[in-house]
Image (cartoon, rainbow, N blue to C red):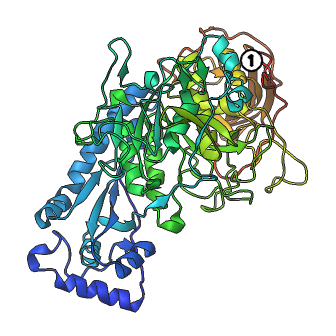
Amino acid sequence: MIFSLLRRVTFLALPLLLALWLGALSLSAQEQVPDADDEPAVLAAIAPALAQQLATTDGPVSFLVILEDQPDSATFLARAGLRNGAREAKGAAIYGYLTDFARTSQSSLRAWLDAQGIVYRSFYIVNALEVQGDAALAAALRTHSAVNRLAANPAVTLSLIDSPAQRTANPPPDPPYGIRYANAPTVWSLGYRGQGIVIASQDTGVDWTHPALRDSYRGWITTTQTVTHPYNWYDYWGTANRQNCDPDPQVPCDDYGHGTHTVGTMLGKDPRNGLIVGMAPEAQWIGCRNMNRGDGTPGSYMGCFEFFLAPFPQNGDPQTDGDPSKAPHIINNSWYCPPSEGCDYDSLRQVVQTVRDAGQLIVVSGGNDGPGCSSVKHPITAYPEVFSVGAHNSGGGITGFSSRGPVTADGSGRMKPQIAAAGDSVQSTIPGGGYGNSSGTSMASPHVAGAAALLWSAVPQLIGQLDETEQILMKSATPVPHNGCGEGPVPVSPNNTYGHGRLNVAAAVGMALYPGTITTTVTSFLGPLAGITVTLTDKQTGLLRTGVSDGAGQVIFQRVYSGSYGITAQGTWTSPETALTLRPDEAQGVEIELTKIYYFPHMLGGIPTQPVSVQPPHPTPPHSREGTASTPPPQWGRLGGGEQLPQPEFKSSAFSEKPNF
């Protein structure tokens, strides 16, 4: 579905309006934008930050042109019957849909820009263009009927707690504390080390020749000791600031050190001494340099997300040369983009919505603006579509710099971060083959990205199932009750400081390996009721699953994970909630009797009975697809807004919660 964004006039100071008007008059007749009215009733909006920049800058500046018509990948997938499709199928379909949409809707505007010799870059992940121009160009573009708004494209400096990591003595032979705190070695001992999973780094770059990273680079071919960089690396900044790297931008480069450090935490292992510094030592990585000496822009972030949605060669065309079959599974993002510095809040959210629709997990550092409440406030970590991570220290306590929720910047009040991981003085790889310590939530999020790789290598059926994956990571976290940011007089978990608690990947894998099943049967005195919507709610995370009863009155929820749940049936009225607690590898049955039957069979209400332990009438093997040809599988969803949910007393019986050190 195409939706239109609201256009409105941005009122500027009188001198700036005069400057833009005079600039527009200076354009010759052949320079007028096609299809633009001579006296438009409504001008496309211009961001105040951009208006100020144009008024105070001599010469062209970079800015974004956001078009009126925007694609809607979620609706497209639903209409194509791919909502529950495989990750690869969804990615390929979305890429084709978005690129066709962009080529068609941008054609007249791009032709005009080409005729004027104006430098621009076309995006498809958002229907937008990045252009180089002045106030006169901005004035002309605002009159075009296809343009919704003009947004700034500011250079945003990477938020650091300390300077880029400096070389230290080689670390001891056991993994860094964050790896042990998350119980990753327990998962390794089971044989799950991230095999078959590709993690993407969107950061300052990567030193691909580092001994702990080279063998894990997807472009490295171990058997022949050769390398292939196209489709595995993209440098948005081209040849800029590659003084210490190969001058060819197709070759990976890290001009700042930050990205190399985060990739090491995700999957680093050093064959020289057997040292493992990463969570998922058998996973692979690809990368995109989105920052130039630590400065990124909304345009560079969009460009890297396009590369991860459908990788392309360095000098290729993203809209024709992309290959979605080479897309990574997980994307780590240790950066943010404050609207206070001119970043466009809505466009970046549309980007992550699209990437999530394609089945790629987006893990994001929570921010370094703590300890104040509601300091999780910037794109992209504030969005509900990403998995945000706070930072704890070696003792498990939250760091002072770790940003807290709830998110108030958009009025949602949603809880953030979702989880906490090690982020204080984390030891990892640095350019040049050495190791160094660094602090920040930038160091915490790679632990979670690596944990997701371990989880997906253990249970491949979870790949691309983002709601389910996030539910497991949250439910298995070690709870840390807290009440510092609006939770009330009593410490609770989850909360706006630790989220659902400290990362515990061993408990997550144990939970995922032993799911249960809940079978609901909806009846009345007339017998089983078909066509009734049944909702299963996870009382800890708020995740919703819905299904429609079949001819036997049943909805079978498979892959349900240990914890407390509520079940309701929806006729004309919603039944009172039935509560149950599910244990690992357990099958439970719930009968809901809807007793108020009127003359019209759809007018139903009722009272549920207590849950009873039964086996499903038609058992299915673990991890099989739910539903039948006549009844679709239950759907996943999430509670919206800032609802605070009670946490059950849950502890995994399969693995210890305490670190193994």
Q: Is residue 31 left or right of residue 398?
A: left
Q: Is residue 644 visible?
A: yes
Image quarter (top left, top right, bottom left or bottom right) of the C terminus: top right
Q: Callout 1: helix, strand or loop?
A: strand
Q: Is residue 561 visible?
A: no
Tally the numbered discs.
1
Q: Position of residue 149 (x, y in %)?
A: 36, 68
Residue nearest the viewer, comparing 124 with 394: 394
Q: Position of residue 276 (x, y in %)?
A: 60, 22
Residue nearest the viewer, comparing 59 with 406: 59
- Residue 267 in the image: above or below residue 487: above
Q: Residue furthest left?
A: 30
Q: Is residue 53 left or right of residue 491?
A: left
- Residue 577 in the image: above or below residue 584: below
Amino acid type of disc 1? Gly
Task: Write the residue at 65% across / 20% down.
Answer: 512
Q: Position of residue 87 (x, y in %)?
A: 43, 27
Q: Which residue is mark 1?
A: 589
Q: Residue 316 sits in which quadrant?
A: top left
Q: Is residue 320 left or right of residue 324?
A: left
